[in-house]
Amino acid sequence: MKPNTRSDTTRPLFEMGTEIPAQPERTQDITDRRAEAKRIVKRLAAIVEDHRQAGVALKIELGPGDLQAVLERLRTHAKGRQGTPLNGGRDEIHSYCLNRLYDELVEEPSNILFTTKTGPDSVRYDAMNAAFWIECLDLMEDIYCAPQQS
């Protein structure tokens, strides 16, 4: 082909919308879902506590309502919709703290791996699926955002 006879059209390597294939939603074999969710919530609570402590130096208090707003956005993201930016911050610094907490927590499902035995000598590692992630977020909200009884 002569250099000056090139076609002006380019053919994409992938069809539009197929660059990232959708993962099939599969039920992960978790024998004790409640105990596993509690383990994950403990991990998430440590992250939240780190952010609360960091906020103290900025004179920002992250309370149950703030955590509830972050958890709601995480659920929205898990359902495939846009989760950020988080609205409702009292000021610019408070909004920044909320969004940083969200940014750190939104990565957790891909950091928590479950194993599936695929053969006698092989194991596959899968990131947490969205349905179980939402269960963990619901449990976290029940534990840390429930109204305190007097």
Image (spheres, rainbow, N blue to C red):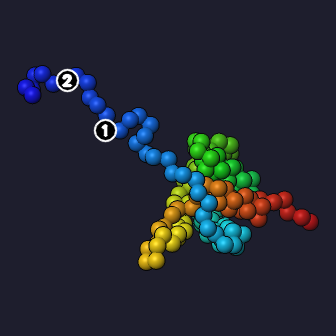
Quadrant in which the C terminus appears: bottom right
Mark 2 vs mark 1: which is more N-terminal? 2
Taking the image as shown, residue 142 lies to the left or right of residue 4, namely: right
Q: Amino acid at mark 1?
A: Leu
Query: Of helix, strand and loop, which one carries label 2?
Result: loop
Label 1, residues with CA under 10 Å away: few <14, some 14-19, many ≥20:
few
User: Which residue lies at the image location 71% right of the left edge and 62% below the top edge?
Assistant: 140
Q: Is residue 40 above or below residue 65?
A: below
Corner quadrant of residue 145: bottom right
What is the x, y in percent for residue 72? 69, 49
- In this view, the residue in front, 12 or 38, is 12
What is the x, y in percent for residue 78? 61, 50
Residue of label 2:
7
Query: Of helix, strand and loop, which one carries label 1?
Result: loop
Taking the image as shown, residue 99 lies to the left or right of residue 138, namely: left
Q: Is residue 132 above or below residue 96?
A: below
Direction front: furthest residue? 120
- In this view, the residue in front, 52 or 45, is 45
What is the x, y in percent for residue 108? 55, 61
Dot 2 and dot 1 residues touching (CB under 8 Å): no
Q: Amino acid at mark 2?
A: Ser
- In this view, the residue in front, 100 or 6, is 6
Distance of mark 2 from mark 1, alpha carbons? 16 Å
Corner quadrant of residue 55: bottom right
Q: Is residue 149 above or below residue 66?
A: below
Residue of label 1:
13
Taking the image as shown, residue 113 lies to the left or right of residue 40, namely: left
User: Which residue lies at the image location 84% right of the left edge and 59% below the top edge?
Assistant: 147
